[in-house]
Image (cartoon, helix red, strand yellow):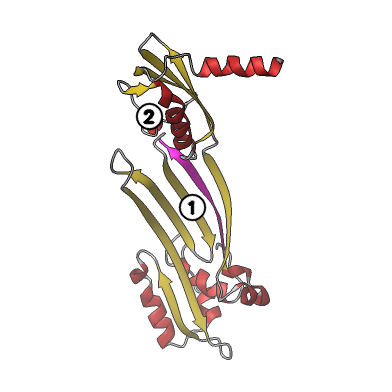
Amino acid sequence: MVRIVIFISVLCMAYPAFSSDSSLIVSNISILGNKKTRPNIILRELTFQEGDTLLSSDLEKHTSRSRENILNTSLFNFVTINILNNSDDKLDVLINVEERWYFWPALIFKYEDRNFSAWLKAKDLTKTKYGFSIEKFNFLGRKQNLRISFLFGYAKQLEISYKNIALDRNRRHFIGGMAEISRQDEMIFDTRYGELLGAHMIGANVTELIAEIVVARNLETTGHEIIKSIHPHPTMSEAIMEAAAAAYNEVIHI
């Protein structure tokens, strides 16, 4: 008997008694708990807005659907919607939300080989990329995602992505963007005599470095001759020396 009384009292608090099929005007919509999320992100998920006229018999359907819409944004852990009786023909809506955690750091480890088995068999740690990323969900409180990644090792890479940017109020059209700065130098040597056979160079200003590779190739320069040659530090030219050292597992600064 006690359980029944409590259940009825709670129901009365959430949905005040209105006459059957009476028309009600949404007078005010209040939101609590949105410390980071902008109010319009929540309001656009509602099936009603301030000034709309609703039938009392449809209140439960509207609040239930609106609550599901807000939860489907994946921005909140909990959402409650309460209907408060303002007057005979007006009502106030109180939305209470609990925001989730939006900041997620992560560690990154990647291998650079045909597959994991080949990399594991070679046991060449120089052919690995490692780093970390920082991802911010609900950036600026607009349900946008910002991700920044830093990679080091076999290839140096900086990646910034910004996505889930709505172009219209109904969120039917989105845009996103990504910018990436990467650098990778790899040199190939003959295993019998150690002379340079070629090189792969990817990144900004590599055209300023390729001349050294051309000269070394024409002179049949070996890897250790390149390693022992003086390359100022820190400069871009030392990437040639570091790439040659990486081929012999003698790398220092990568």
Q: Are marks 1 and 2 in contact (CB under 8 Å)?
A: no
Q: Tell me which residue sits at (43%, 82%) in the image.
A: 216
Q: Tell me which residue sits at (53%, 15%) in the image.
A: 13
Q: Please say if 179 is above or below 21.
A: below
Farthest left residue?
168
Q: Tell me which residue sits at (39%, 48%) in the image.
A: 162
Farthest top residue?
87
Mark 1 highlights which residue?
Answer: 149
Q: Main secondary structure of the magenta part?
A: strand
Farthest bottom residue?
192
**Can residue 36 be spotted in the picture?**
no
Secondary structure beneath dot 2 equals helix
Point out the image quarter for the C terminus.
Answer: bottom right
Q: Residues within 10 Å of mark 2 (few under 14, many from 20)?
A: some
The amino acid on which the numbered mark 1 sits, given as a three-letter code, is: Ser
Q: Please say if 187 is above or below 151.
A: below
Q: Position of residue 120 (x, y in %)?
A: 66, 73
Q: Position of residue 30 (x, y in %)?
A: 41, 19
Q: Is residue 119 magenta?
A: no
Q: Nearer the viewer, mark 1 or mark 2?
A: 2
**Which range of residues does the magenta coloring cover?**
129-140
Mark 2 highlights which residue?
Answer: 43
Q: Tell me which residue sits at (41%, 31%) in the image.
A: 42
In-front residue for pair 63/153: 63
